[in-house]
Amino acid sequence: MQDVLIRDGARVAIRPAMLDCDYYRLLEKEDRKAIREFSDEYMSSYSWAEPTRGSLQFQKKP
């Protein structure tokens, strides 16, 4: 985890390149397989995630 986490004082972030994450692959928009395999499920328990889910659904359209 030390290679994945970036700490700067009280702030903590991650190095996305160090993770295999379908969401990050979707954001790249060049990973057509990740886009095709998106099944409309994205943090459905959280209403604040709906705008992101909508944008992911839009990317999936041909």
Image: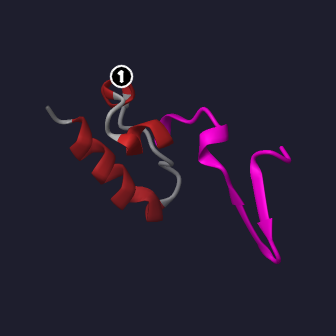
Q: 9 left or right of 51?
A: right
Q: Secondary structure at mark 1?
A: helix
Magenta-drawn stretch contains 13? yes
Category of crowding for the residue at label 1, using alpha-carbon neighbours closer than 10 angstroms: few (below 14), some (14–19), many (at least 20): few
Residue type at tag 1 = Lys
Q: Quadrant location of the N terminus?
A: top right
Residue 59 place in picture, x, y as percent: 25, 42
Q: 59 left or right of 48?
A: left
Counting labels gives 1
Residue 25 place in picture, x, y as percent: 45, 36
Residue 47 place in picture, x, y as percent: 45, 62
Magenta-drawn stretch contains 36? no
Which residue sits at x=81%, y=77%? Answer: 10
* Residue stretch in magenta: 1-23
Which residue sits at x=64%, y=37%? Answer: 19
- Within the image, what quadrant is residue 36 found in? top left
Q: 2 left or right of 50?
A: right
Establish if 9 lies above or below 40.
below
Which residue sits at x=33%, y=31%? Answer: 35
Residue denoted by label 1: 33
